[in-house]
């Protein structure tokens, strides 16, 4: 029997379970393959005792519409930066990648499928360079991975954000208020941009287009006449004013290399008030509501396509590659093409032009 190990890494994302199910179902057609999952990304392999889960038909039954991941995930540590407590009580990190590869050999693992975002695929590439038979599957609600048209989970996040805009509109209109909705998107404003168009927001502020507060005020003023009116601004968590920076702080979680973003909506409220906006303003931070819950159909389909393709790439020994959507095909691309830089919104793109075409202000 040959073994393929599946790991889900980084922040969770609607559709992860649909990928796992598709890998298992496709592998079952080959008779001589067994699928196992490492619990909480590669931690399951690195931990003593090892934490793995047999992924068979029973384990994946009906999981395609469940949010989260049945094998858990983590944003901390990893084989190249395993957190280690030093004698003085502070934390350092150790490279345990060689040990992990040896353990995978000992477990009889012939190939690994790593489902994750930018950080996880950088780890995939490093492990590949060390000789591991690894294949990547792109995952992130932020849609900021290169070399693929879309990542699964993104459309679900956009839907959640759009529904929030829809809901805020009715309360904003009733009270003649301005609502600022903070969406996820640390480096890329895809979720905010799509939800602003779909929901019909007045302004959309994203990391790729630093905003001038006076332009935003001008837009809002045009929405109010004699104190009556309302406005919705969708702001990505990574947005910044011209000459400013995204609001972020170091994570206090041991082993988490990511900055923790937050406060973009509150800062904007303050700036609007300072600029003389008289209307009442409220903020709503959507946060992890965008990541949890059931994936919408589009993401289930894309996740299933990715899972089937990932296992077929194992059969073809297409190691060092990542599954990618290149409409209408799903193809294999070198991991290196995906991790070099991020897929951010191009201010000259059709989507931004479309938004401007229906009057959405970007503060530029
Ligand atoms: O990378 C995806 C993402 O959803 C970002 O938009 C957000 O900043 C981050 O994850 C939040 O991560 P955590 O779950 O660690 O707070």
Image: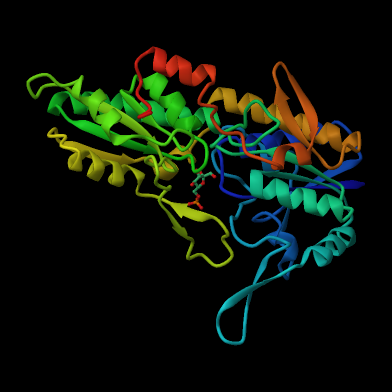
* Left or right: residue 208 compared with residue 320: left
**Percent position of residue 183, x then y:** 41, 37
* Left or right: residue 330 compared with residue 218: right
Vertical comparison of 338 with 104: above or below: above
Q: Residue furthest bottom?
A: 87
Residue 28 in view (yes/no): no
Residue 205 in view (yes/no): yes
Residue under the point 66% across and 36% down: 61
Residue under the point 43% across and 47% down: 246
**Percent position of residue 133, x then y:** 87, 47
Residue under the point 86% across and 38% down: 314
* Left or right: residue 171 compared with residue 329: left
Residue under the point 52% across and 41% down: 187
- Front position in the image: 164 or 244: 244
Residue 196 image-quadrant placement: top left
- Front position in the image: 248 or 327: 248
Vertical comparison of 330 with 41: above or below: above
Quarter occupied by the C terminus: top left
Q: Residue furthest top?
A: 357
Residue 146 image-quadrant placement: top right
Colour pattern of the rendering: rainbow
- Front position in the image: 290 or 212: 212
How many numbered marks have been drawn onto this rendered protein structure?
A: 0
**Percent position of residue 338, x then y:** 71, 38
Q: Residue furthest left?
A: 226
**Percent position of residue 125, x then y:** 78, 48
């Amino acid at each position: 029997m040959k073994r393929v190990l599946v790991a889900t890494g980084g922040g969770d994302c609607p559709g992860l379970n649909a990928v796992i199910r598709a890998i298992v179902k496709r592998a079952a057609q080959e008779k001589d393959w067994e699928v196992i999952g490492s619990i909480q990304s590669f931690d399951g392999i690195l931990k003593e005792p090892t934490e793995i889960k047999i992924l068979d038909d029973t384990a994946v039954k009906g999981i395609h519409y469940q949010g989260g991941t049945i094998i858990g995930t983590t944003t901390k540590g990893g084989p190249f930066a395993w957190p280690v407590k030093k004698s003085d009580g502070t934390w350092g990190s150790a490279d345990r990648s060689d040990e992990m590869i040896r353990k995978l050999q000992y477990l009889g693992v012939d190939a690994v499928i790593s489902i994750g975002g930018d950080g996880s695929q950088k780890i995939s590439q490093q492990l590949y360079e060390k000789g591991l038979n690894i294949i990547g599957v792109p995952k992130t609600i932020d849609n900021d991975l290169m070399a693929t048209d879309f990542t699964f989970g993104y459309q679900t996040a956009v839907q959640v954000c759009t529904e929030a805009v829809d809901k805020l509109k009715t309360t904003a209109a009733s009270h003649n208020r301005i609502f600022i909705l903070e969406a996820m998107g640390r480096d890329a404003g895809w979720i905010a941009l799509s939800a602003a168009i779909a929901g019909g927001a007045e302004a959309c502020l994203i990391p790729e287009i630093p905003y001038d507060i006076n332009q935003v005020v001008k837009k809002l003023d045009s929405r109010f006449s004699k104190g009556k009116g309302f406005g919705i601004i969708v702001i990505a968590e990574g947005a910044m004013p011209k000459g400013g920076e995204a609001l972020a702080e170091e994570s206090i979680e041991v082993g988490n290399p990511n900055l923790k973003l937050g406060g973009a909506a509150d800062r904007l409220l303050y700036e609007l008030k300072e600029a003389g906006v008289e209307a009442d303003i409220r903020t709503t931070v959507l946060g992890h509501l965008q990541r949890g819950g059931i994936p919408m159909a589009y993401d289930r389909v894309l996740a299933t396509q990715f899972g089937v393709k990932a296992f077929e790439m194992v059969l073809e020994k297409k190691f060092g590659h990542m599954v990618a959507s290149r409409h209408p095909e799903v193809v294999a691309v070198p991991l290196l093409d995906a991790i070099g830089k991020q897929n951010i919104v191009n201010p000259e793109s059709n989507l931004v032009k479309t938004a401007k075409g229906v009057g959405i202000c970007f503060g530029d």
